[in-house]
Amino acid sequence: DNQPERVAYFGQMMKTARILINTPASQGGIGDLYNFKLAPSLTLGCGSWGGNSISENVGPKHLINKKTVAKRAENMLWHKLPKSIYFRRGSLPIALDEVITDGHKRALIVTDRFLFNNGYADQITSVLKAAGVETEVFFEVEADPTLSVVRKGAELANSFKPDVIIALGGGSPMDAAKIMWVMYEHPETHFEELALR
């Protein structure tokens, strides 16, 4: 990639349809995955060199040896997370201070039964109530929460009308809280349509 003269010479000399620079050969050759400048294709090129099957009748255009030299150019990916995730010992006061200073007035805390029964949710509600923030706790989240539990939490959110949702615990409360928030803010959303295809 950092030797353009060598790349150009190699590209001229190689008898192939696609030349991929700094790219895994089989995955890169189909386009889009490692190079968004190549149109997606499930073959590595036709022409008299390729010998590939096509889904239409063979014509003159399929016998033309068209060579493509493509550098690696991946699509940008992004992952949106909640505004803030606080963790480690001693982070709770800082997290709650942000909730209060941001002016939130109604907080829904989503957690599991163990943390609720052991008083961890009380540590949050007591601080928020002292600052004038109304609170409601949903503590029915189990490991690998089901859609029925998430819908139950969303129903509570719809009746309580929070302006902030706080997930207390590990991955299960966090995952449940995110889906609850989607269902609360966008009730027209069908969960099944959010699944990866």
Image: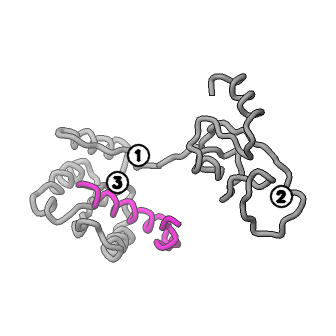
Q: Quadrant of residue 173?
A: bottom left
- How is the rendered protein coloured? one colour
Amino acid type, label 3: Lys
Point 52% across, 72% down: residue: 188
Q: Is residue 83 above or below residue 118?
A: above
Rendered location of residue 184, percent (x, y): 43, 67
Point 39% across, 57% down: residue: 163
Amino acid type, label 2: His
Instruction: Give the residue number, with chain letter if any, for mark 1.
Output: 83
Instruction: Give the residue number, with chain letter if any, for mark 3.
Output: 105
Q: Is residue 8 above or below residue 159?
A: above
Q: Which residues are magenta?
A: 169-197
The numbered disc on residue 62 is 2
Numbered disc in front, either 1 or 2: 2
Cα–Cα gap, marks 1 and 2: 52 Å
Q: Is residue 176 magenta?
A: yes
Numbered disc in front, either 2 or 3: 2
Amino acid type, label 1: Lys
Cα–Cα gap, marks 1 and 3: 17 Å
